[in-house]
Amino acid sequence: MAMLFLLLATGFIARKTGVIDDAASKRLSKLIVNIGQPMMIIHALIKIEYSAEKTREGLIMLVLGLGLHLFMSVFAFLASRGIKDADERKISEFSMLFGNVGFIGFPILRSIFGDIGEFWGSFFVIGFHLFVWTWGIAILARGRNDIKLTPKKVFLNFGTVPCFIGVLLYFLMKWIEIPSVIVTYTGYLNNLCTPISVLIVGALLATRKPKQIFGDGKTYYVCFCKLIAIPLLVCVIETLLGLPEYIILFSTAVSAMPSATNVTMFAELYDIKPGYASQTVGVTSLFTIVTLPLMMLAANFIIGLIR
């Protein structure tokens, strides 16, 4: 988490000193979304040796991803109703629902669970991408006639396609060995994701005035819902349901991730309060440095208390 803070601070300084400007930020975002993210997903799947047990765990995480996003969709819809401005309500709902499980989440999952954490995450984000390109687009399309949801966007995008390719390659490893050069190649591109994506978040924060960042009550409300309320509810519900401890801890971790950078990408694309979107992503990313370790401690406490 300290490393993420330093990267965030570096991005902030880079923007303030002109090293990263609007054009650079957009190009770097495009690089990560179009190249880095697909390779990150594929690499996480093909670097784990195939086994029936890992396959079972991966499929559990796929179902978990769909279930958690359904739960968070309901929560975010209800929690954002009190925000008066229609566009800010959309961005707030989107920010509460979708977490940065990929760019920031994968290295955190690896630090908590080891390489298997990234493997689980690769199955989990299939649900993320399906929801982003369906319910996520539906959120942004409210009151707009120019935002269309199409079957092509749902199934053919830079998130779902690499998920399907990675899963296919993983299952093929039951019979063939993936060449080491492919694993190394995807690994190099995977390593771009975390530093560049966090630098971009820091640069986005630098575009907002301190009063906008820390003086807007809605931002704190989104942070509370996204970083504290949702992960605690997920932890308590899953513990009461008697789910295995590793699933509860994994669910708590992915639920406690900061708002996804997709928020700013779509906000800029459709001109829906891009400044407010960058603010929610930046501030949730900043606060995650403190809240995520606290949520994991709380999860362990809740599991021990209830059981």
Image (tube, grey):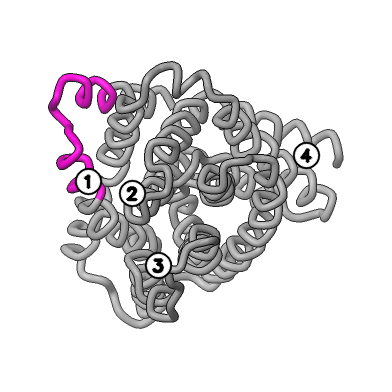
> Magenta stretch?
10-29
Q: Are marks 2 and 1 in contact (CB under 8 Å)?
A: yes
Q: CA distance from mark 2 to mark 4?
A: 41 Å
Q: CA distance from mark 3 to mark 4?
A: 47 Å
Give the answer, above or below, for where 145 lies relative to 34.
below
Tell me residue 255's x, y (percent). 60, 45
For marks 2 and 4, the one nearer the N-term is 2
The residue tagged 2 is 268
Q: Are marks 4 and 1 in contact (CB under 8 Å)?
A: no
The residue tagged 1 is 26
The residue tagged 3 is 146
For marks 3 and 2, the one nearer the N-term is 3
Could you tell me the amino acid type at mark 3? Answer: Asp
Of circles 3 and 2, which is in front? 3
Q: CA distance from mark 3 to mark 1?
A: 22 Å
Of circles 2 and 1, which is in front? 2
Query: Which is more toward the observer, 250 or 209?
Result: 209
